[in-house]
Image (spheres, rainbow, N blue to C red):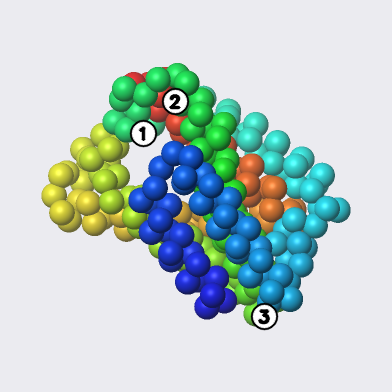
């Protein structure tokens, strides 16, 4: 557990500093390293939610979740009362090819792969072996929330809907970070439950990809 946390701290610092191909390669390397830690600790692919016998069931869960979320995002983007929630200044100047690369490469490899293997795979598997599913969910979700501190540093200025509520002050920035940590920790609980119920890491992977990818697509279209 201690080694896993150390790897995650270093990975968090590096992945938020690097970009492009080096970030993708680092995400793959971190994922492989974490799976190696799990195996070194006596864990198996089943502990990581990657047992071959569970992949088909996990894929069905993932496809269903992607479909549901696509509908939710479409409705939210079309309704005037919720459309502003999807606006994001980080998409200004982004081209269609850049958006496609993020949705099809950066999100699945640079975000979903490493985060799901880390938090719902290795961390969840290690803690569940020692303390059970409740503790595994709690530890994984809290650390998943803290993982998002660095990516949230400029969230209040990037999101007009947040900026209009929190303002441009230091307090507003702190509240935005705190909100992001709490939201992602709560999301982590949902992802862990999907992992538990489906028996496969593919289920939270599908939902995680859909949340990020559809956010990019809708934000890009609403520029």
Q: Can residue 3 be seen?
A: yes
**Label for residue 130?**
3
Q: Which mark is first along the chain, 2 or 1?
A: 1
Q: Which residue is drawn at 45% across and 19% down?
A: 96
Instruction: Measure the C-alpha gap from mark 2 to mark 3.
Output: 43 Å
The label nearer to you, 1 versus 2, is 2
Q: Position of residue 181 (x, y in %)?
A: 39, 57
Q: Where is residue 173 in the image (x, y as percent from the top left)?
A: 22, 51
**Quarter of the C terminus within the rendering:** top left
- The local secondary structure at tag 2 comes to helix
Asked if the residues shown at circle 1 and circle 3 are in contact, with their CB atoms under 8 angstroms apart, the answer is: no
* 83 lies left or right of 117: left
**Label for residue 85?**
1
- The local secondary structure at tag 1 comes to helix
Would you identify the image quadrant in which residue 134 lies? bottom right
Instruction: Measure the C-alpha gap from mark 1 to mark 3.
Output: 41 Å
Q: Where is residue 211 in the image (x, y as percent from the top left)?
A: 52, 39
* 141 lies left or right of 205: left
The label nearer to you, 1 versus 3, is 3
**Label for residue 48?**
none
Considering depth in this image, is 186 or 107 the residue closer to the camera?
Answer: 107
Q: Mark 3 packing: few (<14 Cα in 10 Å), some, or many (20+)? A: few
Establish if 127 lies above or below 180: below
Instruction: Measure the C-alpha gap from mark 1 to mark 2.
Output: 22 Å
Considering depth in this image, is 31 or 103 the residue closer to the camera?
Answer: 31
**Label for residue 98?**
2
Number of labels in the image equals: 3
Q: Can residue 80 be seen?
A: no
- The local secondary structure at tag 3 comes to helix
């Amino acid at each position: 557990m201690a080694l896993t946390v150390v790897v995650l701290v270093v990975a968090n610092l590096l992945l938020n500093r690097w970009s492009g191909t080096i970030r993708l390669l680092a995400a793959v390397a971190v994922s492989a390293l974490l799976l190696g830690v799990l195996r070194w600790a006596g864990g198996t692919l089943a502990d990581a939610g990657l047992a071959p016998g569970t992949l088909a069931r996990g894929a069905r869960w993932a496809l269903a979740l992607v479909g549901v979320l696509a509908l939710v995002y479409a409705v939210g983007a079309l309704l005037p009362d919720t459309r502003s929630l999807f606006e994001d200044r980080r998409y200004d100047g982004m081209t269609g090819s850049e958006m496609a690369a993020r949705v099809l490469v950066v999100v699945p490899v640079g975000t979903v792969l490493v985060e799901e293997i880390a938090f719902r795979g290795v961390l969840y598997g290690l803690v569940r072996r020692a303390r059970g599913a409740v503790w595994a969910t709690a530890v994984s979700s809290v650390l998943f929330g803290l993982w998002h501190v660095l990516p949230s540093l400029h969230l209040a200025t990037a999101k007009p809907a947040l900026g209009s509520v929190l303002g441009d002050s230091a307090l507003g920035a702190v509240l935005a970070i705190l909100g992001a940590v709490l939201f992602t920790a709560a999301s982590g609980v949902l992802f862990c439950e999907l992992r538990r119920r489906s028996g496969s890491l593919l289920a939270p992977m599908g939902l995680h990809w859909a949340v990020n990818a559809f956010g990019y697509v809708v934000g890009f279209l609403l520029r």
